[in-house]
Image (tube, rainbow, N blue to C red):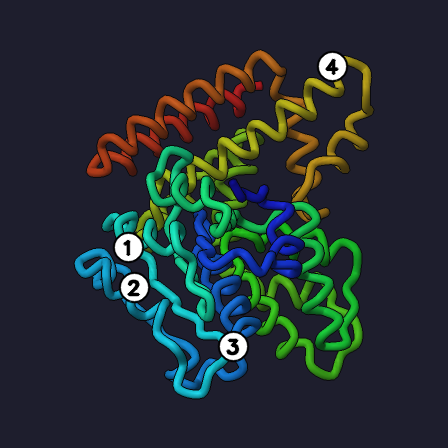
Amino acid sequence: MVAVKAHEADRALARLDPAIRVVLFYGPDQGLVSERSEALTRASVADIADPFQMVRLDGADVASDPLRLLDEANTIGLFGGQRAIRVSATSKPLGSAVEPLLAVPPKDAIVILEGGDLPKANALRLLVERSRSGLAVPCYADQGRSLDAMVDAALREHGLSIERDARTLLVSRLGADRQLSRREMEKLALYAAGKRTIDIDDINAVVGDAAARDVDDVVDGLFCGAIGRVDQSFTRLTNSGDDPTVLLGFVIRHAIALLAARSAVDQGQLPVSEAIARMRGVPFTRKADVETALKRWSSHRLQRALALLHAASAQARRRPDLASELAARVLWNLTLSASKD
């Protein structure tokens, strides 16, 4: 049985057991799924451009013809050496195609499966995890040390350093998808060409777009009781087609962070300034708003706000046709509540 935890993934792949013949990458960060699949493919064969060494298969085709994967995995390369078979993600079941490979692993091929966000009970995930010749690798959005490491590596690659506050702001705008984060870093490096140190102006000019700032305005405006900020930014986001349930997710996440900080202050563990400093991903440009929010919201009120936000989010997911109206109602009600203090 081989199943790795998210933080162990890179180490496990760097020291891949030769007995592993099937590797399943899965998780919500499809950019990271693709990146790790590509990296393992390159590490497994001498030339990924050689069709005799690397074969790409569509997941839906494999599901409809399970024996095709078995045949490809057991085909001997024209010039010998290891081959890689990379199977794209599909919603169709792949168990019947993968099970024979795990029972009798191919000697000269490695099979790389790209999966979606598979739950613990998913049949394919369980099949790979329970096999001695399979490895299931979770791919979750970068956060914490993994995100810091990605930023550091990108900066080193381009010979750049970054100011402290600029780094905090940068990290707050990255992480949802590995490939998107890398593209943002590439844009930033190109924009900063000729400089040695990246500053906040560089981040604001390149990383993230107006939508990111509108999200921040909705989040901070709500907890500060600034109805005008919330109204204008929410309108811009909905007019540009942003999913209201995603926006509610950002508000919920910030409410949870505020509750943790408020609780630490109430229990005498931390002063307000230190509680804010420990809230990850809050750039200095938002610290004044966070301080205002902590003064306006007690732990009890934050808990109640979270209950209302979770309920609205659940309703919006059930009724996507009413998602904008449901989100607007809970956001404006909570903003008005904060504005009265």
Measuring 44% from the left and 53% from the top, which residue is drawn there?
24
C-alpha gap between disc 1 and disc 2: 6 Å
Whether residue 179 is visible = no
Query: Real-space Cα distance between discs 1 and 3?
Result: 23 Å
Marks 2/4: CA distance? 59 Å
Is disc 3 placed on a helix, strand or loop?
A: loop
The disc placed on residue 69 is: 2
Tally of numbered discs: 4
Amino acid type, label 3: Val
Asked if labels 3 and 1 touch by Cβ distance under 8 angstroms, the answer is no
Which sits earlier in the primary sequence, circle 1 or circle 2?
2
Identify whether 341 is placed above or below 280: above
Q: Earlier in the sequence, mark 1 or mark 3?
A: 3
- Whether residue 303 is situated above or below residue 64 in the rendered picture: above
Count residues near mark 3 (Cα–Cα under 10 Å), then give few for <14, some for 14-19, many for 20+: some
Q: Which residue is mark 1?
A: 97
Mark 4 closeness class: few <14, some 14–19, many ≥20 residues within 10 Å = some
Identify which residue, 86 or 298, lies in the foreground.
Answer: 86
Image coords of residue 84 (percent x, y)? 44, 71
Tag 3 residue? 45
Is 153 on the left or on the right of 172, as rendered? right
Tell whether 97 sits left or right of 116.
left
Q: Please give the residue where the numbered disc 4 appears in the rendered image.
A: 266
Placement of the C terminus among the 4 image quadrants: top right
Q: Nearer the viewer, mark 2 or mark 4?
A: 2
Q: Which of the two labelled residues, at mark 2 and mark 4, occupies the earlier sequence position? A: 2
Amino acid bearing label 4: Asp
Residue at 57% in and 66% down: 182
